[in-house]
Amino acid sequence: MIKCKHTRVSGRMITLFLIILFFQPALTVSPGDKNKKEKEDTLRQVKHLLFLTKNNLYDGRLLLQLKDKIGLTEEQEKKIEDLMLEHEAFSIRTSAEIKIKELQFASYLKSKAKKIDRKQMERHIREISSEKTNMIVRYMNYLLDLRELLTRQQMETLRHLRNRKLQDIKEKYKKREKEDREREGHQSLIM
């Protein structure tokens, strides 16, 4: 367990975030695959948001979008905006540092050196992994800090909104499935 400002984060939760961040495909996309890549990214984002809301963790942007529905005070809004700004700045800086280290690592592997220093490679990999882990822990702390800002009533309202949204999604999916079955049945009659 990691202690985060009066809250504990379980190993499972951190493991899930590690899996989400480390195993995201970092693919280069050709123009033909761009639409497919966008759909995959959207699906990944939706799954991530569902995971967060299932665990009563809500991103600052979502909280601000729902501010009237959940009854955020001006003070809460200001704190959420401050936390978001701080988190975004940290994420941008850290992501850039990670990308630079990954580029350095890749260029080292492509170098014409006859023998590759395995210890140096290991150090480099550990540095990159450490930076990514720091980002994940910082993100978890950010989400937990946001959750601590909300009252019990606001959390209950968010749960209610989440459940209602999930129900709407299920109903739309069932309706679309039914329409597809009817369309397939109609097409088989034509042929």
Image (cartoon, rainbow, N blue to C red):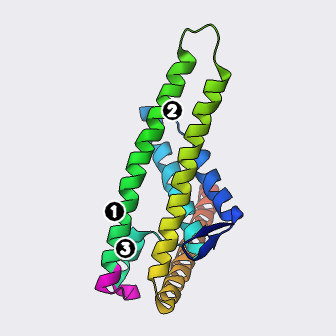
Q: Amino acid at mark 2?
A: Glu
Q: CA distance from mark 2 to mark 1?
A: 26 Å
Task: Name the residue rendered at 45%, 84% in the picture.
Answer: 150
Q: Is residue 28 visible?
A: no
Q: Is residue 171 above or below residue 20?
A: below
Name the one closer to the observer, 28 or 180: 28
Per the model, the C-alpha gap separating discs 3 and 2 is 32 Å
Whether residue 8 is visible to the viewer of this picture, yes or no, is yes
**Residue 41 - label:** none
Residue designated by label 1: 85
Distance (Cα) linking label 1 and label 3: 9 Å
The mark that comes first in sequence, 3 or 2, is 3
Residue type indicated by callout 3: Ile
Q: Which residue is mark 2?
A: 102
Which residue is nearer to you in this view: 135 or 178?
135
Q: Secondary structure at mark 3?
A: helix
- Judge left or right: residue 152 versus residue 181: left
Comes first in the chain, label 1 or label 3:
3
Q: Image quarter for residue 140?
A: bottom right
Residue 185 is situated, as x and y percent measured from the top left of the image, at 64, 62
Q: Considering the numbered disc 1 on the image, is that residue within a helix, a strand or a loop?
A: helix
Q: Which stretch did the figure color magenta? A: 68-76
Q: Contact, CB < 8 Å: mark 2 with mark 1?
A: no
Whether tag 1 and tag 3 are in contact, CB under 8 A, the answer is: no
Residue 80 is marked as: 3
Relative to 83, residue 189 above or below: above
Give residue 128's position: percent from left, percent from top: 55, 39
